[in-house]
Image (cartoon, rainbow, N blue to C red):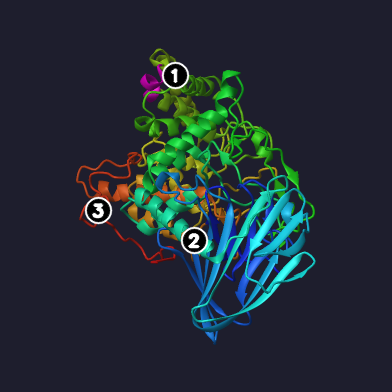
C-alpha cells in the first residue's frame, strides 16, 4: 500500500493522545496512552505498521465532516446499494465538561457504523502493531471482542461476532441494512494491570454522545471570536485543544513523528513534545480562539517544567515532554520504511540539547499576555520570571542555533537577539508583578543595547532588508517578527522593505513563504512553511496593507484539507501538504493572522488610525460583538471554504 497524502487524514483526540483516520476509514496512527507514547497503529509510517480499517466492500464514494463544534468525525460512505455513516472519536471522560474536557479520558477509540439507506457490505481489518510496528501480537477471540497480547501492552477491541483471526490480523465481512449499527471500542492497558473488560454497544453509543456533549461544552465557553474567517479560527481553537495534554496543559507541536519536510528526505523529526518558543504565539492564539483558562494552565506547565534550570544558572531548555520530562534523547527506528520512503523515522528530538536564546522572550511575552489572569504570583514564579529576564540580559550577545534549530555552528541570529529584547521589554512591564522594580533600570539599559545592535547589525544594505543573522545577506521569515512583536512599527520603511523583500524573494510560485533559502547543514530541501506565510499576512496587516494581507492569508489557507487541518509545510512542486500533521504552529499562525487582519480593518475604519502596532491582547475589542449579544458583527472575507462540520 502506498502512503496516502498527509491531507487525507483527520484528527481524533481525547486531550491525552491522538489518532489519525483516513478518508477511507482506516485508523493509521494511534499512540497509547499519551501523545509521545509508542504507536500501536503506525501504517502512516510503514505499510505493515498497524491499522484498524472499516470501509465498504468494492467501490464507494466518501464525504466527511466533524460534528458541529466538536472533534468527533463523521464519514459518509455511499455505494450503489446503500449509504452508511462511520462515527469516530477518542472518548473523553464521562461528564468531562468545559475547562475540564479530557481530564478523565479513558484512552479508548470509539467507532460506530450505521447503515442509513439501503444496504451495504463492509470490510473490517484490525492489525495492531505495538511499539511502532515492532511487535506482531497474538490475537485471540474473547467474549465481546478480540484481545491482543505481546510486549508490555494489552489491547482489547470490543467488536461484534464474526471476526476471523489469522495470526496477527483479524478480519470481518459485515452486511448491514438500513437502521442497523455495529460498534467498536479499542482499549489499551499495561501488562501488569487488571484485564480489560469489553464494552457493549449501548455503552459505546453513550460514550460517543457524551464525547460530543463534552466538546460542545468546551466550544460554548471558548468559541467567542467574531471576525474574518470565524469558522476557521474557531475550528483552529478546537484543534489546539485537541493537541493539548489535559493533565498538564502542555500543547504538542504535532501528534506525529517523521512526516518529512521533503518527500524522500531526511528532515524527519518527532514533534510530539512542547516547545517553549510556541508559548508566546500560542497565548495570543488562545486569547483569540479559546480563552485564558487554557493559556494560564499552559503557562503554569512551562514555569513548572523549566524553573529549576535558571536557578542553577543553566540555559533554559527549549522543549519538554508533555509531562514535563527533560530528557528527549533521539533515536531511529530502522524497521519502519517511512512515509513515502522518507527515512530515517525518528523518536525523541535531539534539539532538546540545543541552545536557543529566543526562549526567554517567548516565556516573558506569554507571562505579560496573561498578566491580568496571573494575579499575585508566588515567590518561586516571581524569581523564575525575573531570572529569565536576567539570563536574556546577560547572554543576548552570545551565539545559538536559532529559532529553526539549525544543526550547524552557532551564529548571531537576529531572531534570537529580538526575543532577548522582547524578554527585557516585557519584564520591565511586569516588574511590579514580579517584585522586581529595582531591576528595571538595568534591564532597560540592556534592552536599549540590543535595540541598537539589531538596527545597526541586523539590517543589510545589499539585501535591502533585515536578514537571518548579523552580517548575513540571507533573508529569513522570522525577521517578520520585528513588526509582530512591536519592535518596529509595521509601517516603518525598513520593516516595509523587509516585508516586500520576503514577499518577492522568499516565496514559491504560489506565493507561499520559505523559512529561509540559505544552507543549514542538512542534506536536501524543504517545503514552504505555512506559519511563515501567515506571519507575512500578519506583518502586511500591521503595515496597513489589507489587500495584500488578505491575499496572502487566503493563499495559505488554500492548503487546508477537507476537515480544516493544516500540516507544517506545502510541497512547492505538487502543492501537497508535507511535514508533521496537524501542526499547532500553522493553526496558531492562522489564528493570529486573522486577528491581525481584523484589527487592521478596525484601524482602517478610523480616520485617525495609526498603523503598525501589534493587536491588543483581548480578542473582544469594543468594535466587535461577543456571541449572544444580539448583533452579528461577523465579517465574511474571501472565498475560503470553512472546515467541514455538520449539525447533529
Of labels 1 and 2, the one closer to you: 2
Which of the 4 image quarters holds residue 49? bottom right
Pick the front one: 337 or 184? 184
Residue in the image at 45% along x and 57% along y: 210
**Residue 640 x %, y %:** 40, 64
Mark 1 surroundings: few (<14), some (14-19) or many (≥20) residues within 10 A: many
Pick the front one: 122 or 638? 122
Q: Which mark is residue 628?
A: 3
Q: Is residue 509 magenta?
A: no
Asked if residue 522 lies left or right of residue 252, the reply is right
State which quarter of the image contains the C terminus: bottom left
Residue occupied by mark 1: 443
**Residue 435 x %, y %:** 40, 17
Q: CA distance from mark 1 to mark 2?
A: 53 Å
State which quarter of the image contains the N terminus: bottom right
Pick the front one: 628 or 440? 628
Q: Do we see residue 454 in this rendering?
A: yes
**Residue 248 x %, y %:** 53, 38
Where does the magenta region start and end? 428-435
* 1 and 2 marks in contact (CB < 8 Å): no
Asked if residue 536 lies left or right of residue 604, the reply is right
For the residue labelled by badge 1, is the local secondary structure a helix, a strand or a loop?
A: helix
* 2 and 3 marks in contact (CB < 8 Å): no
Residue in the image at 35% along x and 39% along y: 617
**Residue 275 x %, y %:** 56, 39
Main secondary structure type of the part rendered in magenta: helix
Q: Is residue 432 magenta?
A: yes
Which of the 4 image quarters holds residue 434? top left
Residue occupied by mark 2: 208
Residue in the image at 43% along x and 53% along y: 214
Amino acid at each position: 500500500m502506498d502512503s496516502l497524502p498527509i491531507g487525507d487524514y483527520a484528527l481524533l483526540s481525547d486531550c491525552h493522545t491522538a489518532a489519525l483516520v483516513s478518508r477511507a476509514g482506516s485508523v493509521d496512527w494511534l499512540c497509547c496512552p499519551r501523545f509521545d507514547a509508542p504507536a500501536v497503529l503506525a501504517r502512516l509510517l510503514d505499510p505493515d505498521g498497524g491499522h484498524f480499517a472499516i470501509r465498504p466492500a468494492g467501490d464507494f464514494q466518501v464525504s466527511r465532516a466533524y460534528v458541529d463544534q466538536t472533534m468527533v468525525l463523521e464519514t459518509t460512505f455511499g455505494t450503489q446499494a446503500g449509504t452508511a455513516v462511520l462515527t469516530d472519536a477518542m472518548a473523553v471522560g464521562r461528564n468531562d465538561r468545559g475547562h475540564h474536557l479530557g481530564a478523565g479520558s479513558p484512552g479508548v477509540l470509539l467507532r460506530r457504523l450505521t447503515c442509513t439507506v439501503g444496504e451495504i457490505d463492509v470490510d473490517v481489518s484490525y492489525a495492531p502493531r505495538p511499539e511502532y510496528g515492532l511487535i506482531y501480537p497474538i490475537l485471540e477471540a474473547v467474549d465481546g471482542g478480540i484481545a491482543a497480547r505481546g510486549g508490555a501492552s494489552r489491547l482489547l477491541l470490543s467488536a461484534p461476532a464474526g471476526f476471523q483471526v489469522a495470526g496477527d490480523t483479524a478480519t470481518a465481512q459485515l452486511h448491514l441494512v438500513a437502521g442497523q449499527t455495529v460498534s467498536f471500542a479499542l482499549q489499551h492497558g499495561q501488562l501488569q494491570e487488571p484485564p480489560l473488560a469489553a464494552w457493549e454497544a449501548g455503552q459505546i453509543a453513550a460514550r460517543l454522545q457524551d464525547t460530543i456533549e463534552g466538546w460542545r461544552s468546551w466550544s460554548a465557553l471558548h468559541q467567542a471570536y467574531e471576525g474574518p474567517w470565524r469558522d476557521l479560527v474557531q475550528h483552529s481553537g478546537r484543534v489546539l485543544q485537541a493537541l493539548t495534554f489535559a493533565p498538564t496543559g502542555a500543547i504538542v507541536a504535532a501528534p506525529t513523528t517523521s512526516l518529512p519536510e521533503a518527500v524522500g528526505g531526511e528532515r524527519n523529526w518527532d514533534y510530539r513534545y512542547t516547545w517553549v518558543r510556541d508559548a508566546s504565539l500560542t497565548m495570543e492564539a488562545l486569547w483569540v480562539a479559546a480563552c485564558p483558562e487554557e493559556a494560564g494552565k499552559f503557562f503554569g506547565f512551562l514555569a513548572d517544567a523549566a524553573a529549576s534550570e535558571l536557578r542553577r544558572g543553566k540555559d533554559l531548555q527549549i522543549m519538554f515532554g508533555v509531562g514535563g520530562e527533560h530528557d528527549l534523547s533521539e533515536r531511529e527506528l530502522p524497521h519502519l520504511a517511512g512515509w513515502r520512503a522518507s527515512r530515517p523515522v525518528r523518536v525523541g528530538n535531539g534539539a532538546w540539547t540545543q541552545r536557543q536564546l529566543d526562549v526567554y522572550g517567548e516565556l516573558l511575552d506569554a507571562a505579560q499576555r496573561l498578566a491580568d489572569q496571573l494575579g499575585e504570583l508566588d515567590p518561586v514564579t516571581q524569581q523564575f520570571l525575573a531570572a529569565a529576564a536576567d539570563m536574556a540580559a546577560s547572554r543576548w550577545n552570545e551565539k545559538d542555533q536559532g529559532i529553526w534549530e539549525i544543526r550547524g555552528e552557532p551564529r548571531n541570529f537576529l531572531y534570537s537577539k529580538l526575543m532577548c529584547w522582547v524578554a527585557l521589554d516585557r519584564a520591565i512591564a511586569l516588574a511590579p508583578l514580579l517584585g522586581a522594580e529595582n531591576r528595571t533600570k538595568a534591564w532597560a539599559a540592556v534592552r536599549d543595547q540590543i535595540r541598537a545592535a539589531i538596527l545597526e547589525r541586523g539590517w543589510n544594505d545589499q539585501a535591502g532588508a533585515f536578514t537571518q543573522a548579523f552580517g548575513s545577506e540571507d533573508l529569513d521569515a522570522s525577521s517578520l517578527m520585528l513588526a509582530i512583536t512591536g519592535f518596529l512599527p509595521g509601517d516603518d520603511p525598513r520593516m516595509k522593505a523587509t516585508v516586500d523583500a520576503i514577499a518577492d524573494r522568499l516565496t514559491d510560485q504560489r506565493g507561499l513563504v520559505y523559512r529561509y533559502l540559505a544552507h543549514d547543514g542538512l542534506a536536501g530541501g524543504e517545503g514552504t512553511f505555512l506559519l511563515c506565510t501567515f506571519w507575512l499576512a500578519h506583518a502586511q496587516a500591521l503595515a496597513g496593507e489589507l489587500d495584500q494581507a488578505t491575499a496572502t492569508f487566503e493563499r495559505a489557507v488554500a492548503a487546508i484539507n477537507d476537515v480544516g487541518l493544516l500540516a507544517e509545510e506545502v510541497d512547492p512542486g505538487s502543492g501537497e501538504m508535507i511535514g508533521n500533521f496537524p501542526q499547532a504552529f500553522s493553526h496558531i499562525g492562522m489564528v493570529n493572522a486573522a486577528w491581525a487582519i481584523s484589527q487592521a480593518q478596525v484601524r482602517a475604519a478610523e480616520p485617525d488610525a495609526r498603523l503598525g502596532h501589534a493587536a491588543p491582547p483581548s480578542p473582544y475589542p469594543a468594535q466587535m460583538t461577543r456571541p449572544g449579544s444580539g448583533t452579528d458583527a461577523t465579517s465574511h472575507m474571501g472565498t475560503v471554504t470553512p472546515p467541514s462540520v455538520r449539525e447533529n
